Amino acid sequence: MICWGEQNCCGVFLDRDKNDRCDCLRDFCIRDYLPEDRITVSEKDLDKVIKALYDKEDFNMVYTSEIIAIKSILGNPMYVNETKQLIDRLSQRLTELEFDVEVVTVQPQGNVKTPHYVIFANYFSTPAKNVVLVYGGVTVKDVNKSDWSHYPFQLTQSNQDLFGNGLTSTKGPVLCWIFAAQAWLDAMHDLPVNLRFIIDTFDTEYNQMLRKVIDDRKVFFKGVDLLITTTNLWITPTTPLLTTSHSGYIYFELEVKENAKKNSPEEPEPAEAESTTKTMSSSITPIIIGASVATPTNGVRGLWRQQKPHQ
């Protein structure tokens, strides 16, 4: 069961057979604490945690290599066992870090041919902390090996860069959060926040099936102060949401210059324009129009008017 306390906004998993209340003063929650009385992090604490993280660098690299090697390929029946193996590895690791862990199996429906798995993990120590919920997926898409400079299912380091399928978009971000939790527990024997995880094997672009699983566990979201997610379609397909990943954002700058070879003895100043598109050898008007229609649906309205050539 879950103890919500008198304020009915903080929660912790309890064994119903042992107790119907948690050990801390559950008559209080973080909203009852003045800001100066809430648990905060000092710079000294953070320095200890960073040192603990570096001390575990070799172990984390080996663990990451093992996770990357698991072919948790999305939607492929050939790799169902490996996908389940990955979920079991992560749930075991979270259990070792003193998280309460539940693994849910979602059976295939409709056009979906493979089962999916969802990890719900919760770490709670005191109501004097904020509650942070981290969401991430750990499946990867099948890739053409010839498109990779290194074998995609082997963690490879080259010139200070790491290569591996899922390293920046799915598996990598989830592992970083787990490694951060491990470092805090090693250095401080506690986390600075009450931390929860939702880790699944759905496609990040089509993970609306997660909604049904969540609707059956609404209490898991109770008391959450901050949500960190790599995709938002499982929350709502219509409302924008700031998301995060370790792959960053890629954009292109386009510079267009006039031909300097003119009859005029004076060199004209170059005409310049910027747009989010790839370089094309064409005049500025077709470039801007092309960039406008090269986007999904109906393009970006009015993008062609954003050209700014020098007069």
Image (spheres, grey):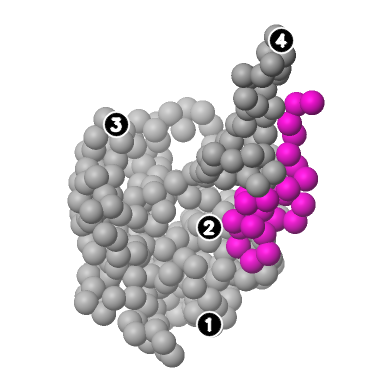
SS under mark 3: loop
- The image shows residue 245 at horizontal and vertical percentages of 48, 50
The reply to whether dot 4 and dot 1 touch (C-beta < 8 Å) is no
Residue designated by label 1: 212
Per the image, is 65 magenta? no
Tell which of 41 and 207 is nearer to you: 207
Badge 4 amino acid: Glu
Q: Earlier in the sequence, mark 3 or mark 2?
A: 3
User: Which residue is identified by label 4?
Assistant: 266
Q: Secondary structure at mark 4?
A: loop
Residue 291 image offset from top left, x and y in percent: 62, 50
The residue that label 2 is drawn on is 229
Disc 4 or 1, which lies upstream in sequence?
1
Q: Relative to the observer, which residue lies in front, 204 or 99? A: 204
Give the mark, 1 or 2, whose residue is nearer the N terminus.
1
Q: Magenta part mainly helix, strand or loop?
A: loop
> Residue 257 at x, y = what percent?
63, 27
Along the polypeptide, which appears first: circle 4 or circle 2?
2
SS at badge 1: helix
